[in-house]
Image: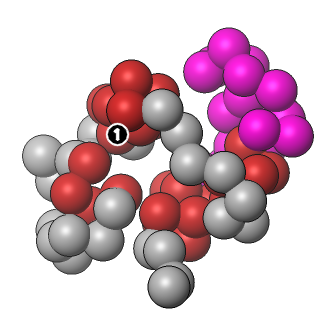
Amino acid sequence: MIFIFPYRLKQLRENLGLTQEELAKQLNLTQSTIAYYENGRKMPTLENAKIIAQMFNTSLDYLLGICNCKGQ
C-alpha cells in the first residue's frame, strides 16, 4: 500500500524551505523521526499529525491523501 503522507510532508516542508532538522526542532522531535516520516518507515501520532497540519496550514485530510485541497 502506498501512503501519500510521506510525500506530502516532504513537499510541504520543502515548499517552506525548511530542513528536516528545522522542522524537527519546531515539532520537538529528532531529525531522524522526520526522515522516518518522509520515507514512510513511521507515521506520526494523531497529536503530532494535527500539529503538523496546523503548522502547514492544511488539513489532516490533505496530509493523509483523503482530499487534494490544501486549505483547511
Q: In which quarter of the image is residue 67?
A: bottom left
Where does the image place residue 26, in percent across and percent down from the top left? 63, 19
Q: Which residue lies furthest to the bottom in this view?
A: 1
Q: Which residue is drawn at 34% across and 62% down?
A: 64
User: Is the residue 1 above or below the residue 66 in the image?
Assistant: below
Q: Residue 39: give x, y in percent of width and height.
A: 73, 66
Q: In which quarter of the image is residue 19?
A: top right
Check the image and name the residue furthest to the front. Answer: 1
Nearest the eye: 68 or 43: 43
Magenta stretch in the rendered image: 13-33
* 11 sits to left or right of 19: left
| 11 is higher (above) or lower (below) than 68 | above
Residue 18 appears left or right of 67: right
Can you identify the residue that label 1 sits on? Answer: 53
When asked about the image quadrant of residue 54, the answer is top left
Q: Nearer the viewer, residue 38 or 23?
A: 38
Query: Vertically, is 44 above or below 27?
Result: below
Q: What type of secondary structure mainly makes up the magenta span? A: helix
Tag count: 1
Disc 1 marks a residue whose amino acid type is: Ala
Residue pictured at 72% horizontal, 28% vertical: 24
At label 1, counting other C-alpha atoms closer than 10 Å, the crowd grade (few under 14, some 14-19, many 20 or more) is: many
